[in-house]
Structures are given as structure tokens and as C-alpha cells.
Image (cartoon, helix red, strand yellow):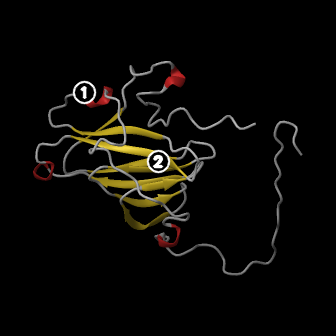
């Protein structure tokens, strides 16, 4: 039985309108603190079911260095990430310098579903900290919508997105020929349907 589209998309378990955990408009968005002129390794996990997701951070690119927890890939710079159920990425984020920030310290992130009849969106904030201030910014409690010019918009997407661009960092360790092939067929049963 299909439970329907999600009520919320969570980032690190947080979402302002996450009614599922009973805190409508009282729980803040996730705020990720970074410092200027540093490189961070982000690990993304598609912990959703049935839905492809896209993640975009305003004014920043990511450099993918690992896919699905396997071997490292040659660095690939992207302006957003797309992932399916269980898919994982390790990506580097190089933060802006103080000069590049020009006083701006808050950047919105948009996570949204695609290839679905209903597009769901979730949000998070990236905050540049200069003085160890850990108070939540006012934006963390403001209801967001896609008409906000500070929230990055995601255009149309094609299936397969970057698959053809990813390359292993080192030579493939697997043999080019095999002596035996084994096929396995997996079936699943759901709610008594056969």
C-alpha cells in the first residue's frame, strides 16, 4: 500500500514545517555552520523512499569525490546533487573568503523531489560564522517558499544526470574476463500481493 507523498523533506532531521514530529513552525531549519576560506567534506545520504531528490546550495558548488561509499572518483564539480533512495555522495565544499562574502553570512539550501506528481521541498541554511556565535539566525524560523529570491531554484532534470561524467580515481581493480557468471533473481512480496 502506497502511503502517499511525504509531508516534509528533512535535512539532518530538521524541517520548519515538519508536522510529523509535532513542531509545526516551532522547529528551526537545520543550520550548518562553516568558516570562510575552508574546505569541508559533506556526506549526503538519500534516506528517502520512492523519491528522487535534488539538493542545491545558493552561491556554492560541490565537488563530488566519492559515490555510494565505494571507491573515490575523480573530482567532479557540480552546482547541485541528485540522488535516489539509498544513494550516497561524498562531496567537498570550499567556502567563500571574507571578501567574497561581502557581508553576507546566510545561504539557503533547497532540497526538492522530482519525477513525482507532487514536488515537495525542504530547506536548510548554511551560515558563515566569524565569532563563534551559535544563536540561530532569524531565517531559521521563517517560513520559506520558492518565491524567496535567496532560495536557489532547481531547473528541469534528466534521468542519469551525471552518471556518464563520473570516473574512478584509480584503475578498475576488477578482472576484464570472468570464468563463471552467477545470476540471482530477487522478488519481493508486499501486503499479500504476489
Q: Work out whether mark 1 precedes mark 2 in sequence or the reverse, and give the earlier one.
A: 2
The answer to whether mark 1 and mark 2 are in CB contact below 8 A is no
Question: Pointer 2: what residue?
Answer: 44
Residue nearest the viewer, comparing 21 with 148: 148
Q: Residue at x 50, y 23 (%)?
A: 19
The single residue placed furthest to the bottom in the displayed view is 177
Quadrant in the picture for residue 139: top left
Where in the figure is residue 118, as x and y percent of width and height?
A: 55, 44
Q: Nearer the viewer, mark 1 or mark 2?
A: 1
Image quarter of the N terminus: top right
Q: Which residue: 43% across, 31% down?
A: 15
Residue for point 29% across, 54% down = 60
Q: How many marks?
A: 2
Vertical placement of 61 versus 152: above or below? Answer: below
Q: Position of residue 80 (x, y in %)?
A: 40, 56
Q: Which residue is mark 1?
A: 138
Mark carried by residue 186: none
Front in this rendered view, residue 123 or 62: 123
CA separation in Å, label 1 and label 2: 26 Å
Horizontal relation, residue 25 to residue 177: left or right: left
Q: Residues within 10 Å of mark 1 (few under 14, many from 20)?
A: few
Q: Residue at x 52, y 64 (%)?
A: 158
Label 2 Cα crowd, 10 Å radius (few <14 / some 14-19 / many 20+): some
Determine the secondary structure under disc 1.
Answer: helix
Coordinates of residue 129 in the picture (x, y in percent): 20, 37
Give SS at disc 2: strand
Depth order, front residue of 32/144 = 144
Amino acid at each position: 500500500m502506497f502511503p502517499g507523498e511525504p509531508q516534509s523533506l528533512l535535512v539532518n532531521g530538521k524541517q520548519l514545517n515538519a508536522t510529523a514530529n509535532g513542531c509545526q513552525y516551532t522547529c528551526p531549519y537545520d543550520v550548518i555552520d562553516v568558516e570562510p576560506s575552508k574546505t569541508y567534506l559533506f556526506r549526503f545520504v538519500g534516506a528517502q523512499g520512492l523519491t528522487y531528490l535534488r539538493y542545491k546550495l545558493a552561491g556554492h558548488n560541490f565537488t563530488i569525490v566519492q559515490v555510494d561509499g565505494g571507491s573515490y572518483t575523480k573530482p567532479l564539480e557540480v552546482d547541485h546533487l541528485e540522488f535516489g533512495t539509498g544513494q550516497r555522495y561524498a562531496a567537498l565544499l570550499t567556502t567563500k573568503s571574507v571578501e567574497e562574502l561581502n557581508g553576507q553570512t546566510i545561504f539557503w539550501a533547497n532540497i526538492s523531489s522530482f519525477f513525482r506528481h507532487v514536488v515537495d521541498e525542504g530547506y536548510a541554511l548554511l551560515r558563515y560564522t566569524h565569532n563563534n556565535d551559535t544563536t540561530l539566525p532569524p531565517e531559521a524560523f521563517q517560513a520559506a517558499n520558492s518565491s524567496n529570491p535567496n532560495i536557489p531554484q532547481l531547473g528541469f532534470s534528466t534521468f542519469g544526470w551525471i552518471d556518464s561524467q563520473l570516473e574512478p580515481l584509480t584503475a578498475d581493480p576488477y578482472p576484464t574476463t570472468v570464468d563463471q557468471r552467477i545470476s540471482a533473481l530477487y522478488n519481493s512480496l508486499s501486503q499479500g500481493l504476489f
